[in-house]
Every structure is written in C-alpha cells, then in structure tokens.
C-alpha cells in the first residue's frame, strides 16, 4: 500500500504492540458484542499464522491514542506491518477468509 502511514514507535509501545511481522491491533469497548467476534476471528488467524500477532486495546482506557489514530468506533482493526505502518483499517467484523486475504501480501512466503 503506497500511502501506508508509519505510526510512532512510542504510540505503538503505549498500546502494547511489540515488533512483529504483522500485528492486528484491535480497538474494543467493554459492552461491544461485535468486539468479541473480532477478538475470536483475530485470535484464530493469529493462531493459524504464527507471523501474525493480535493485540486488543480497550479504547476507553486509551483515549489519547484513539484520538491520535482517528478511531471513531469499535470494533476497529488496524493491520500494522513489520515497519510499524498502518496498511489497512476496518470497522466491524471481518470473516476469517477476508482477514487472511488482507494479510497475505504482508506474510513471508514459505
């Protein structure tokens, strides 16, 4: 993605994102049923693809970061590449096949 935005390392660290090939950064809220569904799908994908890490963040506990990233609703899922760039963003619940397809270009080839 040519216009991918590199996120500040300090911002990622505040959100608990460690260096990884690909990170699924999920913003959730406490009473959000779709957030639980995104957690399930993201966890399954991260289990299936070892290069993928899943980090879930409580949006209400990270309001400054939410504002800085322009998160408008939960669930929001950011795909962060190995360079710390946001390469994709989605709201709502992705299907497992769609999420894997979105990650394919970022994963090492076997």
Image (tube, rainbow, N blue to C red):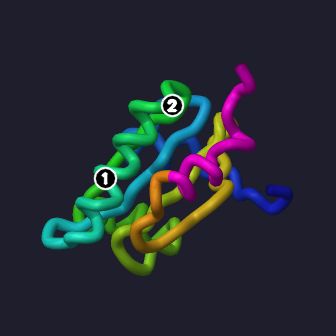
Above or below residue 108? Residue 33 is below
Please give the name of the residue rendered at 21% of the width and 72% of the height, measured from the top-left corner.
Answer: 32
- Which element is circle 2 on? loop
Over which residues does the magenta segment extend? 97-110
Mark 2, other Cα within 10 Å: few <14 / some 14–19 / many ≥20: some
Residue at mark 2 to residue at mark 1: CA–CA distance: 15 Å
- In contact (CB < 8 Å): disc 2 and disc 1: no
Asked whether residue 28 is drawn in magenta, I would say no
Q: Which mark is residue 49?
A: 2
Asked whether residue 98 is drawn in magenta, I would say yes
On the image, the x and y values in percent for residue 2 come to: 85, 57
Residue 76 shown left or right of residue 102 in the figure:
left
- Circle count: 2
On the image, the x and y values in percent for residue 80 come to: 59, 47
On the image, the x and y values in percent for residue 109 come to: 74, 25
Please give the name of the residue rendered at 57% of the width and 52% of the height, measured from the top-left corner.
Answer: 79
């Amino acid at each position: 993605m040519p216009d991918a935005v590199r996120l500040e390392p300090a911002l990622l660290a505040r959100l608990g994102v460690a260096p990884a090939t690909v990170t699924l950064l999920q913003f959730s809220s406490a009473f959000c049923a779709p957030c639980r569904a995104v957690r399930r799908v993201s966890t399954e994908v991260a289990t299936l693809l070892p290069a993928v890490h899943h980090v879930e963040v409580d949006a209400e506990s990270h309001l400054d970061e939410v504002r800085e990233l322009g998160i408008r609703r939960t669930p929001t899922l950011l795909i962060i590449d190995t360079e710390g760039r946001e390469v994709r963003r989605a709201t709502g619940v992705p299907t497992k096949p769609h999420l894997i397809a979105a990650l394919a270009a970022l994963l090492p080839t076997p």
